[in-house]
Image (cartoon, helix red, strand yellow):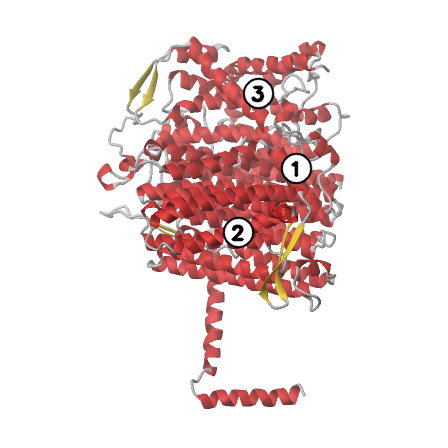
Amino acid sequence: MNLVHAALSPLVGALVLAVLWLAIAAASLVPAGNAAFARRFAFPLGALAGVGLAALGLQAVWLPAQTLTLPLGLPDLPFHLRTDPLAGFFLMLLGSVSAGISVYAAGYFRAEPSGRLALISLQYHVFLASMAFVLLADDAYLFMVAWETMALSSYFLVITDHKQPTIRSAGFLYLLIAHLGAIAILLCFGVLHSGRGDYSFDALRAVQLQPAWATVAFLLAFFGFGAKAGMLPLHAWLPEAHPAAPSPVSALMSGIMIKTAIYGMVRLIFDLIGGMSGNVRWEWGMVVLVVGAATTLFGVLYALMQHDLKRLLAYHSVENIGIILLGLGMAMVFIGFGHPAAGALGLIAGLYHTLNHAVFKGLLFLGAGSILHSTGLRNLNDMGGLIHGMPKTAFYFLIGALAISALPPLNGFVSEWLTFQTALQATILQNGIVRSVVPLFAATLALAGALTAMCFVKVYGIAFLGKPREPAHRSPLPHAGDAGDMERYGMAWLAAGCFVLGLFPSSFLLILNHVCISLTRHGLSDQALSGSGWLWLVPTAPEQASYSPIIFLVMIVAVTLLAFLLVRRFYHGRVRFADPWDCGYPEQTSRMQDTADAFGQPIRHVFGPLYRMDRRLPGPGEAQPKYFLKIEDRHWYWLYLPVARAAEFISSKVALLQQGRISIYLLYSFITLIALLVFVR
Amino acid sequence: MSHVPAVAFQILQSVFVVLAAPLLVGWVNQCRAWLQNRSAPSILLPYWTLAKLFHKDVVIARGASPLFRATPYILFGCMWLAAGIVPVLATGLPFAPAADIIALVGVFALARVFSALAAMDIGTSFGGLGARREMLIGFLAEPAMLMTLFTAAFISGSTQLTTIVDTLGHRQFALHPSLAFAAVAFLMVLLAENARIPIDNPTTHLELTMVHEAMILEYSARHLALIEWAVAIKLFAYMTIGIALFVPWGIAEGGDWHALPLAVGALVAKLALAGAGLALIETLLAKLRLFLAPEFLSTAFLLGVLGMLTHFLVRG
């Protein structure tokens, strides 16, 4: 009886499914040379496991924490596993989003050669399983093992096309920054451990740190996980690695993997360091807010300058991580000042945006993958008119684009709305300066939201609308077919997620409220909870703010339909087709349409100093005019290159020690021994 | 307050706004003609224009996608929805809690995104040009609008437009310096968002200087009529948002039929003044160069932010 009960528990179930992913990974290698196995069996089964994991995660949110100790790992260091509402929420995210991506992958990799597909399937499922173990881990040891497995498996996925040198260097950059982050996390665990007890999270939670050491731990955790999340200024790997990877892998990395960093941040800051948030300080929140605001603006401004679709989406991931950080930062400020209800709202807004971003960014990367698959193009400037050849992909991509632009009634709007509502609570803060600074972050968010809309008008208008920019014989676009069935099912799943998360926000608000209570002991105010039904979303009190996406949707559909029917009823429906208005100049070609670079030009003009720009305009007399523009990330020049040069300088000096002769090394040992004898005694 | 009269009020108000919106455009045009020493067209001219357009045959450019044909209806629907949320005649509207000020800005953003996408659909150079310029104006106007609304939200402690109007309308007459900043910012946003001088010229016939007009170059007949009507409703909605925020006196409670005549009278008087003021601004100012538009709007944005900070400073 107990055994049956245990088997049904979310923890055991999640463990079984994670091991199932590992088994699929191992099985991918066995029937070597059989790509059909991966396509027909491995990826669909992985998707099913994802759905199961999502269901178990949802169950875990409502149950008290469960723990399990596995006799694996090192002697005296068994693996501790645990599910609690926070882990449950992230397992739900991992399971549901990965299900869509796995279904898509089954279709996407159809033309892949067998040997390579077996390897991709192996790494892909190891990657999924390692993310599940990151979420399930309840001690620092297992956490770091899973974290590193995740980094390595995703590294190998990034360099799938390792024959191209740019992809190898992108992978190296990713691995480097991932490890810088991992070192910071490891040090953070060390500070938390402070030489006592063991490394289980329970023990770490019980340690009372000095305020100064707690701040050190916070900074290590924030920047360590920030490196994985793509936070400024550690974001440089993201726009390199995401475009390099195959599209389903980009979707996994951008949709889910960077969210595990958010999980780690919340787990450490609110739970382990914060000690049920009793020790969370508002100054930490200000750090998070400032970094989050910078990340948000930087991400979207650089996204606007990109013409490579996947790079553009990667910069938007940077931006959305910033938005999530804004929510978390506000939560920390409010909790630090002793306003747990407003803090809970900020935490909920941040976590809601985490889930939303996973869904719509996954969808957008899959859409970009379908374009790449059927046209071979990633450069927006070569696209145009795809809506005619790929109407279904165009439809799903439109949903993703509207969702990320935070337009009601889709999901992106809900979490940004909640973040705004959190900022509007600033009046209750005691500190006058903080009180007037917090709304400025709402202004940042408003600016970023409008810029995102501009960016996705650019993407959609240039890729899907208009006409192909190259003549028919030079462009693959006229022959582009729509995405295959499996690809479409994957996108449809995530597009449906955009609607569900957008239309039923109060159900997710209740889930997140429960997560929040388990994490900080406090949730939203009673007024908010009694005011929120399935129809209404009420973050604080009904008279303060409310939003009902369903009524909103019904109203907008009703009035639009009414307008349509009235026009149909009272007027004739005669339509003629003609050539577009050419302004009296008949020599127009489709090359005269706006390009991606041109669309971003006004922004380049307004925000000029933020970019490092290399531009060459053709002279008036040139016979073959050529326009050249290169926009580079300023961070390369003030941060990365100096650090790289310093590292090379130091290692060249250290290399002097290496003489290659055994007598020299013996001399080193001898000097060390003498020194130890003198100083240590 | 029972629900039936409130719903009746809601429907009445929405229909009223949709029907009255072209009249406001006619009034503004009339005032402008007077100010410019021209003989004015009839105030009803916008209605005749709409009727004429509805009766014409639609000409659609070859290669248009379904998005192009759906957009006029979506625009009209968005603006109609906005007209239902803004407390024009009465507060306490039953649908108003479904969308607060942030969602209202979201509706306008939705309309903007669709009109920009439709402009890029045909693949002409002017369409893309207009879409790019419209989004350039929008990316600053939208946050400026939000900041203005947030100032009012901080004063009244609510983001519900009807609650804000209730609070501001029934307060003791008190000077809110923050609202003064917000009012200037709002005026600038209103001019920009409704494609008015100094940002855009609604009467221009020169394609190279167009913003809004460049986006709708390809539309004709009933599609164009719906867009023109939606533009009129948008102007009406913006003006009534301004009235509701800064001079809300005289507005009726939802369901209070006795207050309705007064509310209508007050609204007509205020709109007549606002329309004349808009015509005056458009007569006095010249259109700005396109790259001065971001400066104009960032001023509006900063004024909005300043208004918000002033609120905290004065209170704090």
User: Residue B18's image quarter?
Assistant: top right
User: Residue B184: x, y in percent?
Assistant: 61, 32
Q: Secondary structure at mark 1?
A: helix
Both labels 3 and 2 in a single chain: no
Q: Secondary structure at mark 2?
A: helix
Give the residue at x 63% y 23%: B96
Both labels 2 and 1 in a single chain: yes
**Of tags 3 and 2, which is closer to the observer?**
2
| Disc 1: host chain | A
Q: Secondary structure at mark 3?
A: helix
Name the one closer to the observer, B123 or B212. Answer: B123
User: Residue A56's image quarter?
Assistant: top right
Q: Which mark is residue A18?
A: 2
Amino acid type at image mark 1: Leu
Q: Which residue is mark 3?
A: B83
Where A74 falls versus A275 (above or below)?
below
Name the one closer to the observer, A614 or A552. Answer: A552
The quadrant in which the N terminus of chain B is found is top right
| Disc 3: host chain | B
Q: Which mark is residue A510?
A: 1
Name the one closer to the observer, A127 or A429. Answer: A127
Where A414 falls versus A14 (above or below)?
above
Q: CA distance from mark 2 to mark 1?
A: 27 Å
Amino acid type at image mark 2: Ala
User: Residue A374: x, y in percent?
Assistant: 32, 41
Sort mark 2 into few (<14), some (14-19) or many (20+) by Cα contacts within 10 Å.
many
